[in-house]
């Protein structure tokens, strides 16, 4: 698991608070990270955004989803019924991130890194040896 890639045999499933929107993903995550940027904080209403990033074609969504373009590169997906934040999809569709809090089994994955530490709220201390980057990770 050193490079953040995990072999996933069974589907990754999750959904919103009211149950109207469900998703299922198959395959191997691109990475599992925490983002501390202000856009993620605002979009989630939380101090950080923990996510499992998947290839765009690996995720099937059922039910209603509203999409908000939070930047020219990212669309945020949410349930229009209950408001649950569910996704962050690259505008080019190459990857889609699943919000870890919306997973049916949120303990299944452990983040392997943190990005945008420059915007981390001062009181957040995850401890441990989780590598972090002041902004995005190196390309």
Image (spheres, rainbow, N blue to C red):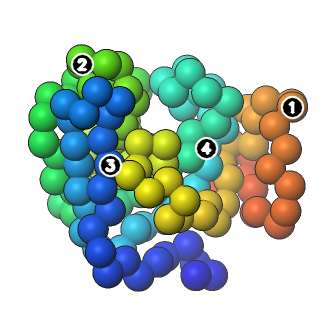
Left or right relative to 53: residue 137:
right
Which residue is label 3 attached to?
14
Residue depicted at 83% across the width and 66% down the height? 129
Near mark 4 (Cα within 10 A), the count class, few <14, some 14-19 or many ≥20, is: many
Query: In the image, residue 134 lies at what x, y percent?
Result: 75, 46
Residue 28 found in image quarter: bottom left
Cα distance, mark 3 to mark 4? 20 Å
Near mark 2 (Cα within 10 A), the count class, few <14, some 14-19 or many ≥20, is: some
Viewer-side residue, 82 vs 115: 82
Q: Is residue 2 above or below residue 114?
A: below
- Which badge, 3 or 2, is on the more N-terminal residue? 3
Image quarter of the C terminus: bottom right
- Which badge, 3 or 1, is on the more N-terminal residue? 3
Cα distance, mark 2 to mark 4? 24 Å
Query: In the image, residue 131 lies at what x, y percent?
Result: 76, 63
User: Which structural element holds mark 2?
Assistant: loop
Left or right relative to 8: residue 38:
right
Cα distance, mark 3 to mark 2? 16 Å
């Amino acid at each position: 698991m050193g490079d953040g890639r995990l072999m996933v045999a069974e589907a990754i499933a999750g959904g919103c608070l009211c149950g109207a929107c469900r998703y299922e993903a198959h395959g191997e995550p691109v990475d599992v990270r925490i983002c501390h940027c202000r856009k993620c904080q605002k979009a989630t209403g939380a101090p950080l955004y923990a996510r499992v990033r998947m290839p765009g074609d690996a995720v099937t969504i059922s039910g209603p989803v509203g999409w908000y373009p939070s930047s020219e590169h990212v669309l945020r997906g949410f349930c229009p019924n209950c408001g649950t934040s569910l996704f962050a999809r690259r505008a080019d569709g190459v990857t889609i991130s699943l919000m870890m809090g919306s997973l049916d089994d949120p303990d299944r994955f452990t983040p392997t890194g943190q990005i945008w530490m420059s915007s981390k709220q001062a009181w957040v201390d995850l401890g441990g040896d989780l590598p972090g980057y002041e902004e995005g990770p190196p390309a």
